[in-house]
Amino acid sequence: MTERRPVLAVIGAGPAGLAASLAAASRGVRVVLVDSAPAVGGQFYRQPSPGLGAGGPQMLPHQRRTWDRLRAGLDAHLAAGRVSHMSDRHVWCVERESGGFVVHALLGPEQERSAAFRVDAVLLATGGYEKVLPFPGWTLPGVVTAGGAQALAKSGLSLPGRTAVVAGSGPLLLPVATGLAAAGARVVALVETATPAGFARQARTWATAPVRLAEGAAYTARLLRHRTAVMFRHMVVAAHGGERVESVTVAASDADGLPAPGSERRLDCDMLAVGHGLLPHTDLAEGLGCRLDATGVRVDDEQRTDVPGVWAAGEVTGIGGAPLSLAEGHIAGRSAAARLTGTTPDPRDWAPAARSRTRLRTFFAALEHAYGGPPARWPEQVTDDTLVCRCEEVTAGAVREAVGTLGAGDLRTVKLLTRAGMGWCQGRMCEPGVAGVAGCPPTPARRLPARPVPLGVLAAPTDPTLPGDLNFPYSEGT
C-alpha cells in the first residue's frame, strides 16, 4: 500500500498562489489549487477571454517570461498529477478540524451548489481588492474602478467608454492608463493626487530596484506616446452626466488636501476609472482566526500565520505587487512542503526569494509613502446627497446624521442606524467610504461566510472527503 502524500490547499491562483503551488508540488506535496476565475493568473496575469479573438494589452517582456515559466511549471505538475486546478470555485469558508481543514467552495458562475473537501494544510493567496471612495457622481454608468477597467481591457471585453480619464492615487494607475490606451481608448488624462516631490525624496530606494524603475519609465513613455496628460497633485471633484458620465471636474490639491480655489477644470469623457490603492483580502484569514496587523495577515519568516497549518502569501499579507507575491509564494510553498513532509525547514532552501522579499518590501513601503494615498480631507468633498453605500442606498447625509445627531461613535453603530454595509457586499466595498465620512476608524470584523452564500447551500448536507486522486475529488451539495 502506497503512503498517502500530504495535501495542501492553495486558495488563489494569482502570482503568489502559482509560485506556492509549484514550490510545494516540487517537494512532494499534493496541491489542490482553488480559484474563482476560469483560468489561472489572477488579475496581474489575466488572460483574454477565450473565444473573443482579442489579444489584449501586451505585457512587458520580463513579465511575459515569468508567466511562461509559471504556466509551463504548472502544466508539468498537472500532467504528473501533483497539482489539481479547481477553477470557478469560490471559497466561502475554511474550517479547522482535528488533523486538518475543510474547504467549502461554491461551484461555477451561478454559485448554486457547494463543494467541500478535506486537506492537511491551507495556504491563503487571496490577493487584494480595491479601496473604493465615494464622490459626487461616482455611481453614474461609465464610472468604474481602476482595477475593473484593467480587467475589462486585459480580458478583451468591451470597455464602458472610448474616451477615458484615469484618476486617484497609487501605482496601479499607470498600467491601467496604458492598458486602456492599448485596448483602443483615448486616455485624455491621468489625474494623480501624489506630487513629484514625494518620489524625489525616495530616490535612494528607487536605485535599489532598477527593474521596477524601468517598468515605471516604460509605462510613462507609453502614456507620452498616446499624448495622455499627466496631472500630479490633482483630484477628481465630481463626475457629471445624465444617463452616463459625460465629463469630470478635476482640481489641484492645496496643502490641506482640498481643491485649490480657481483650479477647477472640466474634462470631457465617457469613462472614468478611479483607484485609491488596494486592501488585502483577509476574510478567510479572519474566519480562521489569523492575526492581522496594519498591512494584512501577520506572518513569520516562513510566511506562516499564527494558526498552525495555515500559511499566507502575496497581497493578503500586505500590498506589494506581483514580484513580491512571487517571492512570498515561493517561500510559503517550500515551508509548507517541508513541514507537511516532516522535514526540518531550511531557510537556505529559499534564501534568494527571502532576499528578494526583503528588498521588495522596502521598495513598496517607500512607494506607498511616495504616493501618500487620497487627500486627507477627501470626505469634506462628499456632498450629503452622495450615496456612500450603494447596496442599501445610504447617503453621506444619513451617515453624518447618525454620527452628529444620533451619537454613533463607531462603524457598527453607524451600520445599525443607517443600514450602511448591510447589503450584498456586507461592507466589503463601502466600508472605507462610510468610515471616512463618519470619521470612524475601519474596524475589521470576522465575517462568516467570506462571501454571500445561498441559503440552500447552507442547508444542504455535504460529506467532506479527503482527496484520493486530484481530479475533482470532493463531495458536492445541491
Image (cartoon, helix red, strand yellow):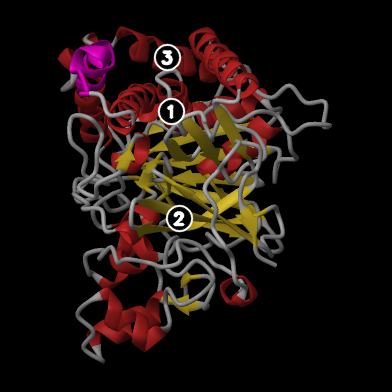
Residue 230's spot in the image, x, y percent? 44, 28
Q: Nearer the viewer, mark 1 or mark 3?
A: 1
Q: Gap in Å between the C-alphas at discs 1 and 3?
A: 35 Å
Q: Secondary structure at mark 3?
A: helix
The residue closer to the viewer here, 278 or 308, is 308
Residue at (27, 26) in percent of width and height: 196
On residue 29, the disc is 1
On residue 353, the disc is none
Q: Secondary structure at mark 2?
A: strand
Query: What amino acid type should be assigned to the residue bearing mark 3?
Result: Glu
Decide whether the magenta segment is chiefly helix, strand or loop. Answer: helix
Give the residue number, with chain letter if any, for mark 3.
215
221 with respect to 161 (left or right):
left
Q: Does residue 465 lie above or below 287 as drawn? A: above
**Badge 1 density bin: few <14, some 14–19, many ≥20, Cα 10 Å:** many
Q: Gap in Å between the C-alphas at discs 2 and 1?
A: 17 Å
Q: Secondary structure at mark 1?
A: loop
Residue 253's spot in the image, x, y percent? 30, 45
Query: What amino acid type should be assigned to the residue bearing mark 2?
Result: Val
Q: Is residue 450 magenta?
A: no
Give the residue number, with chain letter if any, for mark 2.
102
Residue at (22, 10) in percent of width and height: 208
Which residues, given as a range, are shown in magenta?
Answer: 344-358
